[in-house]
Amino acid sequence: MAGTGEGKKEEDYKRLHSFPLIRHTDMPEEMRVETMELCVTACEKFATNNESAAKMIKESMDKKFGSSWHVVIGEGFGFEVTHEVKNLLYMFFGGSLAVCVWKCS
Amino acid sequence: MSVYNSNPAVTRKGSNVQKVPGGKLGEGFLEPQGKGLIKPPDQVELSEAELQEEITRILTTNNPHAPKNIVRFSFKERVYKSCVVDQMAVLFEMEGSLVHEDSDEGRRLRARGSLCEELAAGGIETEPDEEKSEATVTTTEDGGEVEEAGEDDRPDSVASKIDRKEPKQTNQFNFSERSSQTLNNPLRDRSCQTEPPPRCTFSATANQWEIYDAYVEELQQQEKSQSDDSKLRKAAKILERMVHQNIFDDIAQDFKYFEDPSDEFRDPEGTLLPLWRFQYEKAKRLSVTALCWNGKYQDLFAVGMGSFDFSKQGAGMLLVYTLKNSWFPEHIYPTTSGVMCLDIHKQRSYLVAVGFHNGSVAVYNLKREGTEPVHQSTAKTGQHTDPVWQVRWQQDDMDNNHNFFSVSADGRVVSWTLVKNELVFTDIIRLSVNGTVPEDQEQSPQVSVACGTALDFHKQTDYLFLVGTEEGRIHKCSKTYSSQFLETYDAHRMSVHAVKWNHFHSKVFISCSSDYTVKIWDHTISNPMFTFDLNAAVGDVSWSPYSSTVFAAVTTDGRVHVFDLTVNKYEAICQQAVVTKKAKPTRIEFNPIHPIIIVGDNRGYVTSLKLSPNLRKKPKAKKGQEVPEGPEVEVAKMEKLLSLLREPEQNTS
């Protein structure tokens, strides 16, 4: 990326990589947008507390799309989950966070 | 023995006293089992004498189960008092659906006559319970008429006297016809099982380098798609121009080659040939307030959109069109306030100075992306307090900074200099009604300011400029003297709309006004050299760039007037309506190279027109003589005209 100095690079990186980036999803369009916005809101609201953010996402999703949603937020993790078809979203946000939201009841 | 008999038929006999022998309770009840007496095993054996003994049994109206010791506290007398206990015990009750025929209700119904008969026939069948009870009664007790005294207590109970021939009287409040009842659908159970929702598994690893890589990849893709977009845009632009050229091929041919042959027979009059018409959908409601050709690209011109109407002010727009595409502007700059004037820099043709109705001035750079101006004045940096009526670029100053002048209705003439990121202002002159300029800026505010409406700089003499005012005066000023005017011309009776120096003759300028006149002046003489009355308010006037004696003016009646003073000193050689009936033309500009003019109107249209050969005719060349050309010739042509006018004046004076 552009920028020669280390500081500038860092700043550039922060600025450029702040948008939400969906890595994998099989949700329908409307649901995907809603879920993504919810994740962004939660991560921005609880910038320092992933647990609260995950809780907020889970509770909102349970309310909106029926129960038994699962949410994982973190900077590094590996996972294998079984989910109901058309109910999975895996995205990156803010340059360092990964959010995985899926439904399985 | 119990005194209280629970048989309702007996109880209802009220206060009647019966003498019953022995254990017999009542004739009717014992009859079915009358023949052989069945003795219970634990029956008490009684002697004959004991059996013969008469025991008087009395039926009372007292309920043996009713409590007798109920007392209530009377607050009035402050003692406990026994209260009345209800002695009636209801053992069975059923609301009948029929009315007793002897009751008031029944009699009334019967009086109504045969109408009820049919109903009653149905009524009998619908009350199976009633029937049954009656049936039992009739079978147990012989005789067609049954005497049951107990029935009298309840007026709405089943009729005791029943004549089968007589129709029954129905109770209107508890009766429904069988025929009006529908069959209830039988219920049925069904069950089935669905497939569980399909599932699948997903696995991934999230860590910092994965996330970083994903973002980098995404950004690269975005960049790629953006560059694709710009490529596509360029191709689309070329294609649009090609299509435009094909569709308007005849107009393009006319623009280049058509010379109206009928001019030969019409001499000296000429015509204007309409070419392209420019309009932008989003600026449809706005009026064209300013026009300016680009000095470098002869097909490019800027259009300022706003409104001259004080009550209809709103957003404005700066559009840049090319003759190669009349459908869509090359550049679009929406503005918050209406554009009132604009000027394109002579050398740096990408710089456009714009004056707004809210008093601010701005500089747009056509090379830049985005719709924001590169410089804009604010209230802090000396912005005008009234609409800016004219802006004019100046030669770069000694530090090579670009600068321009503006004149506004608040009476200030301000010089603006573009210094790096700032717009620095300097007040040059303040105009006032009585003709003199206030000494300093802190002077009392009672001095009523004159509203400047037009401005033009002398083509050769750098410091000299003219300011037209709303009062009709024109002031000749110098940049170096801010305290006084060099000259004041009482030019017009109404607001001056334009003042313009002649392109060739350094002494001559032209002015136009709402008072229907266009005047041509020698700036050394305080009276106009020529005055033309055009019979309608003149919105704008413009000298032609090819001849010192040709100019064009637009009037609010929708016409363009083109004059050539060498041909006719008194009348226009072309008067032509160029806009649609309701629109009023507002501005006119000559193209610096091509023989066309553009006219803007208050409906947002810009019309381009080609001048016919008669309007740009050169003086006839005598045989064998070379046609003289160049600015000197043009100056001489004008001078000749002026000298004709000056001499008689000098003679008289």
Image: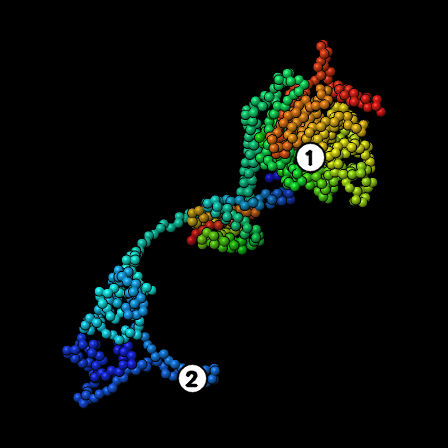
Q: Residue A57: image x %, image y %?
A: 51, 53
Provide the residue designation for mark 1: B341
Q: Is residue B569 visible?
A: yes
Q: Position of residue B344 (x, y in %)?
A: 69, 31
Residues at marks 2 and 1 on the same chain: yes
Camera-side residue of B6 and B241 = B6
Above or below, comparing residue B261 to residue A11 in the picture: above
**Chain ID, mark 1:** B
Extreme residue in the left direction? B35
User: Residue B433, located in which quarter of the rendered image?
Assistant: top right
Amino acid carrying mark 2 in the image: Lys
Q: Is residue B490 left or right of residue B36?
A: right
Closer to the camera: disc 2 or disc 1? 2
- What amino acid does circle 1 point to? Cys
Return the x and y of residue B25 as percentages of the image width and height.
22, 80
Q: In the figure, residue B231 lies in which quadrant? A: top right
Q: Which residue is mark 2?
A: B81
Image check: B574 left or right of B25?
Answer: right
Mark 2 and mark 1 residues within 8 Å of each other at the beta carbon: no
Instruction: Please state which of residues B144 and B267 is positioned toward the viewer in this rendering.
Output: B144
Work out which residue is located at the far right of the displayed protein and give it. B653
Residue at image x 22%, y 66%? B164
- Which residue is at a point 75% across and 32% down the rendered structure image? B492
| Residue occupying the point 57% across, 30% down | B327
Pointer 2 chain = B
